[in-house]
Each structure stands twice: as structure tokens, then as C-alpha cells.
Amino acid sequence: MDDGDMSTRDSALPDGLTRHDGDAPSLVVDTPAGRGEIHLDGACVTRWAPAGADEVLFLSDRSRYGEGVAIRGGVPLCAPWFATGRTKDRGPRHGFFRTVRWSLTEARRDDDDVTVVLELPPLTRIADVPGVTGVPADLTATYTVTMGAQLRMALTITSPSEPFELEEALHTYLRVSDVTTVRLEGLDGARYADRAPGGRAVNAQSGDVTLLRETDRVYASSETVTVVDGDRRLVVAKAGSNSTVVWNPWERKAAELEDLGDEEWRTMLCVETANALAGRVSLDAGESHTMTATISVRED
């Protein structure tokens, strides 16, 4: 099933999935188990909540949409490099996966879960994107998203003809009541690089993580992270991931971001499933790597 078959005709899609075309095409999921939205630009999941629950993902009121634009919120895809790459000179920042328009190749429903499969366009179509140099011309990527009572995202990247050093992140923006009062369980004892102003390259986490200022940390951890937000717990489990990124711009940096409201930083927390910095993945020719994140909600 290719993207050309996926018009707004309901008959082409399973029950519970609707496509909205236009300048910013999206897929909307609505089943008894949960609801959500995926933008084809950047393959960005922008909304998700299990039935009866509040929105789990943060999405800025100032976010921009459309091909070539990185969405501020949801789960942007950072790849095939993280930030400006290991050489610190790659562009666009966080790679081009989050700014190109992906193709819908499959959609199905299993009970009350809806699964969609998206494919990265051929690199020959995006060769003029700055920074694409140095990427294998036949690099491919498939993104499988399942929405229902949980949100499951699996990014598979393949380098068919040559070795490639891969960095990637599912840049998950979680909606929280107040970032200054939440805590993160699951990172105790993990080493991390502090990328915030004045931060040190090597640190060790002691106890739960709390945020007191601008935070930009890359933890060497493959463990599940739980965000404790009052009586609500947001659980981020993962596989194929060597790193967890914890990020919040805080007041000063938020004011510098045109697509983020000055006070919106208080209600967002990024907990990113990643392979970054020392946690990068070395792909041999013909090898694939899959990184998966599963998000669930518990109410106490």
C-alpha cells in the first residue's frame, strides 16, 4: 500500500484512522483505546492520550508546520545525527529526518490499536538539504507507530552499501503540570554528559533526577524512565537505545525560541530515547538497527 493509495477516502484506511491532507498532512487516530495524531512532515507524532486520560505529549501553541519545518513538540525524529553531530559541524541541527515529508506505506488495526508504517523518502529527493553530505546515498528508514492504550514507536535505519556511524533520538516532549516539581526515576547511578552552559562532560547521577535550571543531559542508560508528576506517572520504556536525553530550556533559553511560548517551558519535559555521543551505533554495510520507545500512563 503506497502513499498514493492513501487519500482521504475512508475506505483506504482502517476504522479509527483518518487522513487529513493539505499543506501539513496528518493522520488522526481515534479508537476506544486512545487517540492521537501523526504529521507526515518529519513523521512527527504530535498528540497521544489513552482513553479517558489527558494529553501525554506537549505541543507548543507557537509550533510551525509544513515540509522543511521542525515541529516544536510531540516526538520529532532526530537522525541521522544528534545536535550538530560528532564532528560538531553537521546541519540542519538534529538531522533531516524531522523536516522531510515521509510516505505512508501501511496502515492496520489490531483490536483497538492502530499501526501506521512510514518510510523516509529516497535521499535523491532531498540531496539539496544542507548537511546531507556524508550520508550513504541508499540509507533507508522505516518508522512504525502504534497508538492505543500505549504509544509505541520503532525507528529502523538501514545502511545497505557502506558502514555508517548513526546517532538518533525520539525527541519526546512530555506534558507535565510543572517541570520544577516532577522527578525522574530510573537514572540513579548513570553517567551523563551535561551539555547545559557550565556543564561538565562526565557526571554521575545520584538518586532521582529533578530539574532546577536549564537542563541538557545525555545519560548513558538503556533503562526505563518514569516521570513522577503528582499522582500521574509517565513511563518511557525502550529497546535498542544506549542513551537517554533529558532536556528543558528553562526561562532564559525559552525566551530565545520563536516557536515556544515564554512560559511554556514549565509544562514540558523532554525524555528522549536515543543513541547519541558515546552511545552512537556503528552500522556495517547492509546492517539495520531498530530503536523502540513505548510510553504508558499510570494514575495512582
Image (cartoon, rainbow, N blue to C red):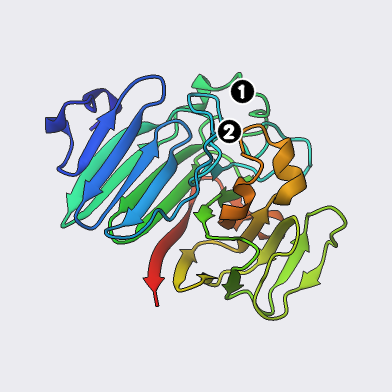
Q: Can residue 114 be seen at all in this image of the molecule?
A: yes
Q: Nearer the viewer, residue 87 or 110?
A: 110
Position of the N terminus by quadrant: top left
Comparing 272 with 158, the one in front is 272
Residue 166: x and y in percent read: 61, 48
Q: Amino acid at mark 1?
A: Val
Total marks in image: 2
Q: Residue furthest right?
A: 198
Tell me the element at label 1: loop
Snapshot quadrant of residue 131: top right
- Residue 90 at x, y percent in the picture: 72, 35
Q: Quadrant of the C terminus?
A: bottom left
On residue 69, which mark appears?
none
- The three-letter code of the residue at mark 2 reads Phe
Is the residue under label 2 in contact with that under label 1 (CB below 8 Å)?
A: yes
Residue under the image location 79 percent in, 41 percent down: 88
Instruction: Residue under label 2, please give it.
Output: 96
| Residue occupying the point 48% across, 64% down | 238
Q: Which one is nearer the viewer's eye here, 294 or 283?
A: 294
Q: Which quarter of the picture shows residue 103?
A: top left
Task: Say left or right for 10 vs 37.
Answer: left
Identify which residue is drawn at 61% across, 23% down. 129
Q: Earlier in the sequence, mark 1 or mark 2?
A: 2
Please give left or right for residue 183 compared with residue 30 in the image: right
Work out whether residue 148 or residue 49 is closer to the camera in this orientation and state it: 49
Q: Residue furthest left?
A: 11
What residue did someone put label 1 on?
A: 129
As drawn, the residue found furthest toward the front would be 263
Provide the secondary structure element on which disc 2 rests.
Answer: loop
For residue 23, side relative to residue 221 (left or right): left
- Residue at the (57%, 69%) spot, across then down: 222
Indicate the position of residue 273 as horizontal and vertical percent values.
55, 58
